């Protein structure tokens, strides 16, 4: 369990996976997840659409050219690929890629979470994701980009 008492804990994408992989959140803590990843690789059958080979290829490219691999990942996720410097430290991005291949959401935590997902998220297969969830709000016409998801959640769920 994370240290501290929180009324609400929220996560987006990989941050949601980090939240959902933890099984010891206090019962009183509300869990909100946006663009959830329960397990990244499609082979896990938990809603991810990317093949393990694709993740491994991105990881291999990352070792050679981190910025190029990040742009490829952004395109895969349907987001506008950012040019220029890396948005985070290279080691942190490498850790995130490793976490995508290593972490799985804990079923009990998933059942407690309130989930928001874009209807057209290219990283998520709704038919495979929905059976794992208790509460899911599908955001029509949206994908994986938090810049679109967060305002839509704010408008729809005040």
Image: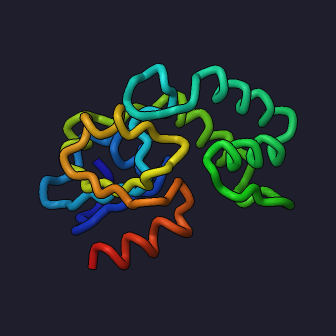
Residue at x-position 68% and y-position 49% = 74
Q: Which residue is found at the position 46% from the left and 56% from the top?
A: 12
Q: Nearer the viewer, residue 33 or 27?
A: 33
How did the renderer colour the structure?
rainbow
Residue lying at the far front of the rendered structure:
141
25 or 126: nearer the viewer: 126
Up-down: is 127 above or below 109?
above
Number of marks drawn: 0
Please give the name of the residue rendered at 32% of the width and 52% of the height, measured from the top-left corner.
2
Task: Residue 56 in the image: state x and y as whole percent.
Answer: 67, 25
In the rendered image, residue 100, in percent from the top left (x then y), is placed at 53, 35
Please name whichever residue, 152 or 109, is drawn nearer the observer in this view of the structure: 152
Q: Quadrant of residue 87?
A: bottom right
Residue 140, located in which quarter of the rendered image? bottom left
User: Where the C terminus falls, by quadrant?
Assistant: bottom left
Q: Quadrant of residue 150?
A: bottom left
Q: Nearer the viewer, residue 132 or 98?
A: 132
**Residue furthest to the left:** 27
Relative vertical location of residue 133 with respect to residue 116 in this rendering, above or below = above
Task: Describe residue 124's horizontal placement relative to residue 77 as left or right.
Answer: left
With 109 as the anchor, is 61 left or right in this view? Answer: right
Q: Position of residue 153 (x, y in %)?
A: 37, 70
Residue drawn at x 39%, y 60% is 139
């Amino acid at each position: 369990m994370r240290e501290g008492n929180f009324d609400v804990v929220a996560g987006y994408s990989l941050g949601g996976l980090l939240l959902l992989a933890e099984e010891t959140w206090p019962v009183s803590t509300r869990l909100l997840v946006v663009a959830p990843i329960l397990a990244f690789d499609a082979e896990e059958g938990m809603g991810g659409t990317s093949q393990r080979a694709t993740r491994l290829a991105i990881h291999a490219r990352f070792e050679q050219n981190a910025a190029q691999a990040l742009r490829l990942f952004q395109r895969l996720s349907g987001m506008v690929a950012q040019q220029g410097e890396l948005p985070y430290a290279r080691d942190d991005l490498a850790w995130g890629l490793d976490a995508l291949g290593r972490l799985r959401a804990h079923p009990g935590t998933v059942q407690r979470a309130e989930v928001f997902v874009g209807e057209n998220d290219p990283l998520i297969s709704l038919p495979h994701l929905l059976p794992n969830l208790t509460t899911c709000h599908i955001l029509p016409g949206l994908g994986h980009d938090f810049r679109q998801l967060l305002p839509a959640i704010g408008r729809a769920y005040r």
